[in-house]
Amino acid sequence: MQKEIVLLPGDGIGREIMNSAKVVLDKVATLYNHQFTFHSHAIGGAALDEHGVPLPEEAVQACKTADGILLGAVGGKKWESLPPHLRPEKGLLEIRSTLGLFANLRPIKGFSSLLHASPLKEEVIKGSDILIVRELTGGLYFGKPSERREDGDAAIDTLYYHRSEIERVVDHAFKSAMIRDKHLTSVDKANVLESSRLWREIVEEKSKEYPEVTVEHVLVDAAAMKLITNPNSFDVMVTENLFGDILSDEASVLTGSIGLLPSASLNEDGVGLYEPIHGSAPDIAGKGIANPLGMILSAALMLRHSFELEEEAKAIEDAVQEALEQGYHTADLHIQNDGKQVGTEEMTQVVLNILSKK
């Protein structure tokens, strides 16, 4: 198999962890007789410094023709004082919108060797395995242009959704539920918001196409509490952009391993952008101590969702799990029983060594 992959390292630790993902993919290509070609482009603050914009046109064009896209991280204090249209994060929003990346998938699954680091009791979090499907190109973040009125003392943001935007992400969530435990939780605020009432109506309509899936409607505030008190009650969750942003960040810390969690953002053609959920961590950039596993696991998601290489994706995930079970960890993680703390390159090499034995 031949695939073109665009690398968007971004800012902070992005370049370091991106290199880890690349060498792991190179190893997979060798082991399974694939050919992956890589093209690197700037995004975020790095693009601002080099090109004067957070998303250069050459990067956009490269992403449009790629089979898969890997993103490191964007942002940092260096660019915080810039106006909104020049902030590094604007580049990320633009690439999502330009490529039509409407469905954001965040698998939240704990590693047994790290459950002690969860803020929840181990008996509460143990066995939890959640897939959050977040609508990514609509809602408050992409409504009519935000504005300030009344001499700057009032602000307006528009939460807008068209039926078609809701239908496609809800359909994706049902399909995900079908290959998991056939349980879908739709999160909204239908007791207050008209957009949520439309959302709930569409979920009910779609449920008729998937009679095997049990559907549950939960208000967003109740869902936030339930994630803390009973995370095992969720399998697939689907929700709109803002709610999904908040809930997925909440869920990500429950396993005690935010540095390990990947994400996928997909369009209707199956092309996706894959990135770890953590930030650019500029305070540790260049020190060789960043955790590469979230980026490596994001590469595994790319193999699964965009390339349909399930065996290869699972080989990477199993290698990461085995590395952790052997006690290897970076400084951000805390393994019990005197684990072996290593740096970015060393952790990557451990994963490569395990893969080589498959």
Image (cartoon, rainbow, N blue to C red):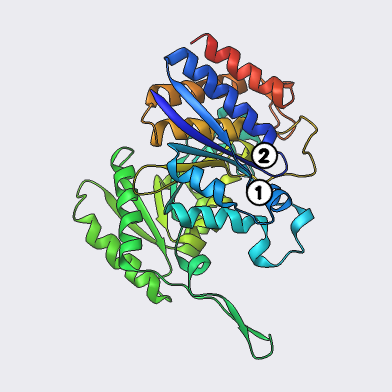
Q: Is residue 287 above or below residue 75?
A: above
For the residues marked 1 and 2, what is the alpha-carbon distance in whole angstroms?
8 Å
Kindly identify the residue that appears in the image at 68 percent across and 36 percent down.
15
| Residue named by callout 1 | 74
* Horizontal arrangement in the rendering, residue 281 relative to residue 245 (left or right): right
In the image, which disc is placed on residue 82?
Answer: none
Is residue 251 visible to us here?
no
Q: In the depicted view, which residue is nearer to us: 352 or 216? A: 352
Label 2 secondary element = helix
Kindly identify the residue that appears in the image at 59 percent across and 34 percent down.
295
Q: Amino acid at mark 2?
A: Gly
Badge 2 crowding class, 10 Å Cα cut-off, few under 14, some 14 to 19, many 20 or more, is many
> In the displayed image of the protein, which residue is found farthest to the top?
357
Total numbered labels: 2
Label 1 secondary element = loop
In the image, which disc is placed on residue 14?
Answer: 2
Q: Are marks 1 and 2 in contact (CB under 8 Å)?
A: yes
Task: Estimate the x, y position of residue 276 in percent, counting from the top left.
Answer: 58, 40
* Horizontal arrangement in the rendering, residue 8 relative to residue 15 (left or right): left
Task: Estimate the x, y position of residue 131 in percent, counting from the top left.
Answer: 43, 44
Is residue 200 visible to us here?
yes
Q: Quadrant of residue 337?
A: top right
> In the displayed image of the protein, which residue is found farthest to the bottom?
150
Kindly identify the residue that appears in the image at 63 percent across and 56 percent down.
89
Q: Amino acid at mark 1?
A: Val
Kindly identify the residue that appears in the image at 34 percent across and 62 percent down.
166
